Amino acid sequence: MSTIVEEKTKEAVMNGVAKNGKVGAQLPPLNANGADNPQSKYRAFPPVPLPDRQWPDKQIAQAPLWCSVDLRDGNQALAIPMSVEEKLEMFDLLMGIGFKEIEIGFPSASQIEFDFCRRLIEENRIPADVTVQVLVQAREELIRRSFEALQGAQRAVVHLYNSTNPAQRRIVFGLSRDEIKAIAVRGAALVRQLADENPQTQWVFQYSPESFVLTELDYSLEVCEAVADAWRATPQNRIVLNLPTTVESSTPNIHADQIEWFCRHLKERERAIISLHTHNDRGTGVAATELALMAGAQRVEGTLFGNGERTGNLDIVTVALNLLTQGVEPNLDFSDLPRIREVYERCTRMAVTPRHPARCRGRIPCLCHEQQHSHQRLSSCPGRGCWS
């Protein structure tokens, strides 16, 4: 298959060269008048009106709740998705690292995802202190299929989502704000009903307004509060409100402002855990997560080494080791990074770059006597998190 794709790509490139004299000449100009001024193409992301923001003076004093999405978000981004056996090996690896919440897939989306979920449950592979999570759109048939996949689980998170941003409301669905909110509330009500019908499982409810970062803040708040009401959330029975940067579109400080604004305005704040799910489209997923934790978030979703669609999800390895080097115990064990990397690369067929921060924390600083700033060499190397 790859050979056919390569040949077709080569043919297309050569046709472009033959017709135009150089590769890429067939591409249109950057904009209609041929100008390449970015000011004629793009608009700056609007700031959040929060003049009394508090997060810049905060520090991260404890690790967040972690949720690995390697087996869902990470897997769906792979050119060759993992087999069930590879998923099982990754699941065991994630548990060994210390993850207590693991999103295992989208069982209503494909048979292999469903079968993987069933195998974990039927073979008793999920320890009592680990909670599995499944993702599902706010659609009745998909919600029912997800509950089928989770039959017999001791504890599970049902992660419900629907699209909320203006472009999707207008172009994809052609629906009003109230109609989009109604989709979320109907989905939440069905999740609540099916959970009540299956009391043998301890259920946790999670909701994401997809593309939160591109949705009006007041509307994201309105939808999330409506879902929380439908789930009858209380401080004793908290839900998770996950606020994703589905496509990273602003600088990290603006994302922190969004999170602080949301936390301040959410009614009955104590009935919800605020969760982050950053992507790395602008290369600042780690920074956005760290600043958003300072702004009040309590939970982080991400993947090992930042695997994920497009430019990747949040890199949990980097954030966890960043916490460690600031004197905060991350509650994740990355002491055997060579093995973690080996399993990750073999199961995902993705390579960890030689300049990944986790690698540079180990071997690279030991070699800096060869560099200009030799006086900054780390005397404690090799240390925790090192590989050769």
Image: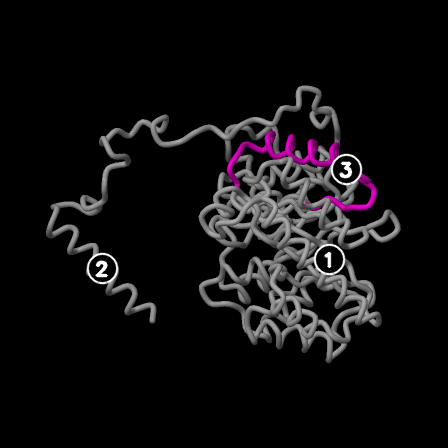
Can residue 366 be seen here? The reply is no
| Residue 90 figure quarter | bottom right
Compared to residue 219, the image places residue 130 above or below, namely: below
Residue 282 coordinates in the image, percent (x, y) = 49, 39
Rendered location of residue 316, percent (x, y)? 64, 49
What secondary structure is the magenta-colored segment mainly?
helix
The residue range painted magenta reads 248-275
Residue topped by disc 1 = 99
Residue labelled with disc 3: 327
Circle 3 residues within 10 Å: few <14, some 14–19, many ≥20: few
Of labels 3 and 1, the one closer to you: 1
Inter-mark Cα distance, 1 to 2 = 44 Å
Q: Earlier in the sequence, mark 3 or mark 2?
A: 2
Q: Secondary structure at mark 3?
A: loop
Q: Position of residue 83 (x, y in %)?
A: 55, 73
Distance from Cα at disc 3 to Cα at disc 2: 52 Å
* Residue 325 in view (yes/no): yes
Q: Looking at the image, which is closer to me, 32 or 187?
A: 187
Q: CA distance from mark 3 to mark 1?
A: 20 Å
Q: Which mark is residue 10?
A: 2
Going from the N terminus, do you reach mark 1 or mark 2 first?
2
Quick one: label 1, few (<14), some, or many (20+) residues within 10 Å?
many
Residue 100 shown left or right of residue 355 in the figure: right
Work out whether mark 3 precedes mark 1 in sequence or the reverse, and give the earlier one. 1
Residue 264 in magenta stretch: yes
